[in-house]
Image: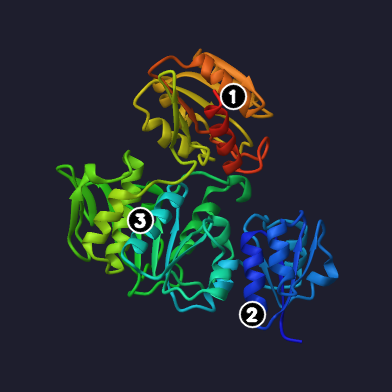
Amino acid sequence: MGQRIVVLGAGESGAGAAVLAMKKGFDVFVSDMSKIKEQYKEMLDSRGIQWEEGQHTEELILNADEVIKSPGIPNNAPIILKIKEKNIPVISEIEFAGRYTNAKMICITGSNGKTTTTSLIYHIFKTAGLNVGLAGNIGQSLALQVAEKNYDYYVIELSSFQLDNMYKFHANIAILMNITPDHLDRYDHNMQNYVDAKFRIIQNQTEDDAFIFWNDDPIIQRELKKYGIHAKLYPFSAVKEKGVIAYTEDHKVIITEPIAFNMEQEELALTGTHNLYNSLAAGISANVAGIHKEAIREALSDFKGVEHRLEKVARVRGVDYINDSKATNVNSCWYALQSMTTKTVLILGGKDKGNDYNEIADLVKEKCSGLIYLGLHNEKLHAFFDPMGLPIADVQSMKDAVEAAYKMAKKGETVLLSPCCASFDLFKSYEDRGDQFKACVRAL
């Protein structure tokens, strides 16, 4: 038999990794503690890949030469600790896939703005007619695409969890949007561990590569000084300041390197300060990749946005309803509230990842006309926000949340679902939460 690869977790990334491992001649076994979705069972069965669900059978796992771990499995899961005791290498699906392609890799990480920036870069590359795939936390698994397609470029959204198990992988263009506290429950509540994970995106970069980052992030600035960074630096900021190569001036978006580029800021499809950063990062990436100015301009002006990210749902009786279900941390909600131009009824709550709500306290006082707590355990929200004296409602279902918002919001106001929390207390995923919100709003 050839080398044995065990894949833990049979979601999009795990199933894709198994298909690629099979194609490359490995002895493959897939194990998932939960139930495996039908589509992934079919994917594995049709290729004769062995799998198990609802358990981890140790004798079938601890004989692996290498383990590919899904990003959702924590590093301290019992099976992972046993694998590590045996000194079996644990890698991510992205690390594995990277071994089998020479495509150029454009990789995006950060606490916020990842999905929008990734989608925007993909849109620009497609508009320019390049042969490009979309992967990572979005789109199809990278491993599956490497197994079955032949792209010249991949635009990859990387979470800190994926980066944790990446070692030899090489990003040609690395983008770091920002670093704010998130997922600290997975990093021993130590911010530095999370920061270190994010900075893994620049490992293995050479002077031929690009590192694009937000210049005004104090944590990024502090960390930059620690690393001997080989890649060429492309810092961006909202305004012109020392050292940045992209900024806005006189209502224009300006990129100075490697090729001079500008366009009217009002032509950008995405509005708001945080989206300006997403557009700048995407524009620089396209510029570095040698895409013509016309294609960059066209793509930045006609991009449709990302579902569940400040998505306008409907206007009912003069009240706008906005779905920002993708706001699974406090910083995302901060951006959403910052972009509100009317008084807002905010729906928040869910599975708390050790959140600090002080970050949005001032914005809630300034912008909110009411709060709706949507979750199984709302004690922390009550303790923090009740003293502000705003009207509040406690709900345990999306239908009740939307009905409470409908009663609370006055004409000319906005109802914003921007939960600050993970969705797993009441919903299958943030997508499920957003879809339910949209369905309830449309049924009003």
Q: Is residue 396 left or right of residue 289?
A: right
Task: State which tag comes first along the sequence, 2 or 1.
Answer: 2
Tell me the residue at 43%/58% (across/down).
108
Disc assigned to residue 276:
none
Quadrant position of the N terminus in the picture: bottom right
Mark yes or no: residue 334 visible: yes
Mark 1 lies on a secondary structure that is: helix
Amino acid identity at mark 3: Phe
Amino acid identity at mark 2: Lys
Task: State which tag comes first along the sequence, 1 or 3.
Answer: 3
Task: State which tag comes first along the sequence, 3 or 2.
Answer: 2
Q: Which residue is mark 2?
A: 23
Tell me the residue at 47%/48% (across/down).
111
x and y percentages locating residue 417 in the rendered image: 51, 31
From the viewer's side, name the closer residue of 184 and 299: 299
Q: Quadrant of residue 36?
A: bottom right
Q: CA distance from mark 1 to mark 3?
A: 38 Å
Mark yes or no: residue 240 visible: no
Mark 3 lies on a secondary structure that is: strand
Quick check: 337 above or below 370? below
Quick check: 401 above or below 128? above
From the viewer's side, name the closer residue of 334 and 308: 308
x and y percentages locating residue 181 in the rendered image: 51, 44
Sort mark 3 into few (<14), some (14-19) or many (20+) by Cα contacts within 10 Å: many
x and y percentages locating residue 158 in the rendered image: 50, 58
Q: CA distance from mark 3 to mark 2?
A: 37 Å
Mark 2 lies on a secondary structure that is: helix
Quadrant position of the C terminus in the picture: top right
Disc assigned to residue 213:
3
Disc assigned to residue 401:
1
Q: Are marks 1 and 3 in contact (CB under 8 Å)?
A: no
Q: Residue furthest front?
A: 443
